[in-house]
Amino acid sequence: MKRFKGMVILLLILASVLTPIAIMATGVLPYGAYVVRTGSMFPAIPPASVVIVETDQYEVGQVITFRRAGDRTTHRLMAVNDDATLTTKGDANDTSDPFTVPRADVIGGVTAFVPNLGYLVVYLQNPLAVGSLIMCVLSIWYAGSSAAGPGAKSTKESAGKTRISVRAA
């Protein structure tokens, strides 16, 4: 029963962590989550933060996430240009970005961020990491369930009983 209870708790923890991530990843909600990999937005958003982005919602002065060269960049929106492109700048950078961003490439505005969660997200994107994490959890679970050893009785079961052993001479 103890083993079953531990497994249920583990599954509930995994479900509570993975469900919001899965919902955001499927695009059901108008939000996305992205990892900030560089220090260009420091100190406002530290590297390895996960930013929560509201799709197509942004204004001048807000931090936005956009597509560029097959990657995603998170910078502050500085201006909307006459040709409908956007000028952006990383907070840690001295000058604006040397390129403009077409509106079609904007994913949305950053509404929140979680510092350091990016380390875990990037780690879990590696299949070997996921496998090693599963093995660690299973090892801990197995070690906890078999700590008493095979055939051992709990102190409740053996309390009050006297063992007598007889040897033949």
Image (cartoon, helix red, strand yellow):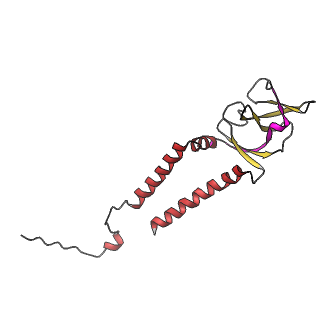
Residue ranking furthest to the front: 70
Determine the image quadrant of residue 127. Answer: top right
Residue ranking furthest to the right: 82
Determine the image quadrant of residue 40. Answer: top right
Residue, x 37% and y 59% (percent of image)? 147
Q: Is residue 114 magenta?
A: yes
- Which of 77 and 115 lies nearest the eye of the viewer? 77
User: Residue 60, position in %: x, y?
Assistant: 86, 36
Residue, x 77% and y 23% (percent of image)? 94
- Which of 126 and 16 lies nearest the eye of the viewer? 126
User: Residue 84, position in %: x, y?
Assistant: 90, 33
52 lies above or below 95: below
Residue, x 50% and y 51% (percent of image)? 134
Q: Main secondary structure of the magenta part?
A: strand
Q: Which residues are magenta?
A: 99-116
User: Residue 81, position in %: x, y?
Assistant: 90, 30
Determine the image quadrant of residue 51. Answer: top right
User: Residue 43, position in %: x, y?
Assistant: 71, 33
117 lies above or below 69: below
Left or right: 3, with 59 as reference point: left
Image quadrant occupied by the C terminus: bottom left
Q: Is residue 142 magenta?
A: no
What is the total number of numbered labels drawn onto the structure image?
0
Left or right: 47, with 169 as reference point: right
